[in-house]
Each structure stands twice: as structure tokens, then as C-alpha cells.
Image (cartoon, helix red, strand yellow):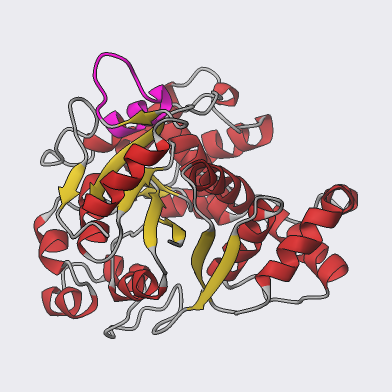
Amino acid sequence: MTITGIIAEFNPFHNGHKYLLEQAQGLKIVVMSGNFVQRGEPAIIDKWTRAQMALAHGADLVVELPFLVSVQSADYFAAGAVAILHRLGVDTLAFGTEEVLDYQRLSDVYGEKAEQMEAFVQTLPDDLSYPQKTQKMWETFAGIKFSGETPNHILGLAYAKACAGKNIRLQPIRRIGAGYHSDEKIEIASATAIRRHITDKSFVEKSAPSSGLILSSPQVSWGNYFNLLKYQIVTSPDLTQIFQVNEELASRISSAIRSAATAEELVEKVATKRYTKARVRRILTYILVNAREAGLPKAVHVLGFTDKGRKHLKMVKKSVDIISRIGAEPWDSMTQQADQVYQLGHHKITEQTWGRVPITIKNEVQ
């Protein structure tokens, strides 16, 4: 049986995500961001609820990306996620993309020329952002051109790199409906549109198959955490002790926080050509949770499964350390610290770590 991996945030789960799961084949394993997501912001709804949505609409097993993988640039995000899926035995990686290219060929190119390609990136001028450098690398070695304004395509290229040499087949699936950042209120809307119009009940019901869960769950955004972030910044004796904060960023952030009224205004004041808005948001997330450099957990944390997913877990647990309940022994202290901070954003957010057990959904075991 085909075992398909999917890397996701489901922030929140919508009709486009349901379509992606429908197009994937065989047993479907999702590795999902936890309570903070890749572009550097809190997930609108907690990880357990989002896992429940995925399991209700086609996923067989949902496991969690550690915080220091989830909140990372595309290459690190992809590499960490693929590494987990590889350990869980996937043979296919399905992903949505705006541009359906021969990603398998690109993966093969990277597998053959990885050292040359990475060395080329190092030769590019520092006034280019890392995404711009990556774009030039692919143009030079694979002859492809893209605008850099298509986030899922950029992740697709990162997945091609991460899968090189792992014998994982790439299955790109063209995105349908609205574009990534579209604000259109249509049936297959973007997650961005749903987050922006979360108070529009009829729109959420039209665009999300688990609208009841979305509408009844505590919802958060950067606005819920800005005062906490400001406190962390103004009381920190040395921001450079925080993960990935250098002296230049520490100075820019400390200066900008004096006049910024919102997290987005702070991002605008700190961002430059070199420091993209996405990178700044990630840095602010690290500051919010007081993130420090740390090793990644060896164990895989399970958020939920169907009967088929449970059967697969029994097969792989002989070779993979599986965590299904976090008790006295921590799974990943950095992720658990982030979860505790996330809970501060809304008084109705339930316990995210201690004693939580995987969500289970019944289906027929094949």
C-alpha cells in the first residue's frame, strides 16, 4: 500500500486542504505544525483541534512538528518535516503548489549537485535575501524561473531538496480556488481569507468542512500576544541570547518597540531587504517564547490517528520512538514551553501538553 506524507499547518483546515487529502493515495500521514506556524505567528486554533479536523476529512495519522522545525525558513522546515515522514515510512510526498513542475527531476538534480548548488548560494551577495538566493540557484542549475511570490511553490522546491536521496516520490497537486494570500470569500478560499473573516459565520461555513469546530474554538492572533512580546523585549537584558537574533536585529527591534502599537507595525519597522517580513515574524515568535538553540527531539509526538493510522504506528514503533502521552518526562522542552505561552493568549485554550492523549477516529482498517 502507498504511504503518503503531507506537510501541513491547516491554519485553519479548509476545503482546499480537504481536496489535497482526497488527491493523496493510500495511508495518509500528516506532519503538522504545532501552535506556532512557519511564517512566524500563532495558529488561529490550537494544534489538537486542527488535528481533529484533518482526521475527520481523510488523514490517517497526524504527528507534530517540533517548534524549532515548525517556525523556520522553508529549507529547514522542509528538511525537518521530511525527516520525520521518512522515519515513519512514507514512500510518497503529496503537496499543493501553484506551479506543477517536474519536481522529481529537480530533486534528482539537487541529489547530484547539492554541494555545488549550496556553494553557489554562498557566493551570492549579502544584500539578497535567502529566498532570492535560492531562486537564483534553481535558475542556474535547473533552468527554472519563478516570481518568488508563490509560497507553496517555494516550499515545493524545498521539499524537492529535502527528499533527494530518500527514495520518496513527489506528488505535486495543483492548488485550486483562491491564491495563497487571496482575500476572496469563495468556497475554496485561502486560509488567509478565513483568518481575516473569521467572524463571518456564513463564509466560514461555506469554506471550511469543520466550520463548527472552528467557530466554537478559542481563536488567537498576534494581537493576543503583543503585550507579552513587548514585555519580553523591554525586559530582556540581551536579545542576542534568543535563537537567531543577531546584534543588528536586537538593536532594530529594541528601537522599534518604543513606537510600534501592533505586532504587524513592529514587523514593518524592523524588516529590510535583507530581513524579510517572514523572517522578522519568526524572530519575534522566538522572542515571545524565549526560544534558545536546542537539539531536536528523537521521538515522534502523535496528535491523533484513525484505526488505519494506529495499525501503521504499531508497525513502525519497533524502529521509531513514539510519544503518545507527555507526562513527567518531556517530549521536547522547547515545544512544550511554546505551548505554555500559546495558552496565555486566550483563557479558554485548554491544556496543550500534560496528560493529553491522541485524538482517535474510527474507520475501517484495510
- Which residue sits furthest top? 328
Q: Is residue 153 above or below residue 289?
A: below
Is residue 338 shown in magenta? yes
Identified at 22% across, 40% down, the residue is 358
Q: Is residue 261 visible in the rendered structure shown here?
A: no
Number of marks in picture: 0
> Residue drawn 15% across and 76% down?
205
Horizontal and vertical percent position of residue 10: 34, 59
Q: Name the quadrant containing residue 138.
A: bottom right
Place of residue 33 in the rendered image (x, y in percent of width and height, measured from the top left): 40, 48
Picture quadrant where residue 290 is located: top left
Check residue 300 for magenta coloring. no
Q: Which residues are magenta?
A: 325-340
Give how far across and how far down residue 11 sits, in percent: 33, 59
Tell whether 215 sits left or right of 50.
Answer: left
**Residue 337 versus residue 269: which sits nearer the camera?**
337
Horizontal and vertical percent for residue 34? 35, 43
In this picture, is 28 found above or below 34? below
Residue 232 position (above or below residue 48):
above
Q: Residue at x 12, y 79 (%)?
A: 202
Instruction: Classify residue 184 as left or right of residue 100.
Output: left
Q: Which image quadrant: the N terminus?
A: bottom left
Q: Is residue 15 visible?
A: yes
Q: Quadrant of the C terminus?
A: bottom left
Nearest the eye: 237 or 347 = 347
Quarter-wise, where is residue 158 in the image? bottom right
The residue lying at 60 percent from left, 45 percent from top is 76
